[in-house]
Image (cartoon, grey):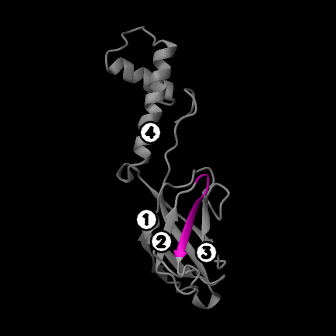
């Protein structure tokens, strides 16, 4: 049997655990409880980097701004994916001028892991080649702060985020 919906998964789990016997059907209350538990489990999985099979790069051409937004409709538009909860190692910036093509070099950025680390920077408006990136996971759009600030239009900022696993909205969702 091919599992195609959350309802199919719930039915199989209830049978495999011996809660349901042959020909029995779970009550609506039991099915809803199992659906909530399934979504909680997916929420837990989404927070574990080692459980996710892929990461994605998002980028934005520099405008000289102090920060760029990331999430659905942000400067780094993630489409249907919600804003990431954190950045993964692997963020970089790239010179995008015609003179650098086709030999564009990626310059790695170190992650500042906390707001306190970013707050210790005295001159946040300094504009030159960046070395660090800080991510503030605000809602609904997160903010990505490269530091020093990337000069206008010469570079693109790339950030690496884990692919977001989304919870099911109803029992009939396709998997």
- Distance from label 3 to label 1 (Cα)? 17 Å
Q: Residue at x 56, y 54 (%)?
A: 83
Report if residue 145 lies within the magenta region.
yes
- First to last magenta residue range: 139-146
Alpha-carbon distance for marks 4 and 3? 34 Å
Q: Sequence-wise, which precedes: disc 4 or disc 1?
A: 4
Callouts 2 and 4 close, C-beta under 8 Å:
no
Q: Report the Cα–Cα distance between label 4 and label 1.
A: 26 Å
Is residue 37 shown in magenta?
A: no
Say few, some or many: other residues with alpha carbon within 10 Å of mark 3 (under 14 / 14 to 19 / 20 or more): some
Distance from label 2 to label 4 (Cα)? 31 Å
- The residue at which mark 3 appears reads as 66
The dot on residue 114 is: 1
Q: Position of residue 134 (x, y in %)?
A: 49, 69
Residue name at image x 31 percent, y 20 percent: 17
Few, some or many residues within 10 Å of mark 1 (<14, 14–19, 20+): few
Dot 2 or dot 3: first in sequence order is: 3
* Residue that label 4 marks: 42
x and y percentages locating residue 110 in the rendered image = 42, 74
Among numbered discs 4 and 3, the one appearing first in the sequence: 4
Q: Which residue is mark 2?
A: 118
Q: Where residue 131 sits: x, y (%)?
A: 46, 80
For label 3, the SS is loop
Foreground tag (4 vs 3): 3
Separation of residues labelled 2 and 3 (CA atoms): 12 Å
Tell me whether circle 2 and circle 3 mark residues in contact (CB < 8 Å): no
């Amino acid at each position: 049997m091919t599992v195609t919906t959350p309802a199919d998964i719930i039915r199989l789990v209830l049978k495999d655990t011996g809660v349901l016997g042959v020909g029995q059907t779970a009550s609506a209350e039991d099915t809803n409880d199992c659906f909530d538990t399934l979504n909680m489990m997916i929420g837990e999985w989404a927070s574990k980097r080692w459980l996710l099979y892929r990461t994605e790069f998002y980028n934005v051409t520099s405008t000289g701004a102090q920060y760029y937004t990331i999430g659905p409709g942000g400067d780094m538009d993630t489409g249907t994916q919600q804003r990431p909860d954190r950045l993964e190692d692997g963020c970089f910036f790239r010179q995008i001028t015609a003179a650098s093509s086709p030999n564009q070099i990626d310059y790695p950025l170190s992650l500042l892991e906390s707001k306190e680390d970013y707050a210790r920077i005295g001159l946040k408006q300094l504009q030159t080649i960046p070395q660090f990136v800080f991510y503030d996971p605000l809602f609904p759009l997160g903010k990505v702060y490269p530091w020093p600030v990337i000069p206008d239009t010469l570079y693109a900022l790339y950030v690496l985020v884990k692919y977001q696993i989304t919870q099911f909205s109803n029992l009939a969702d396709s998997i």
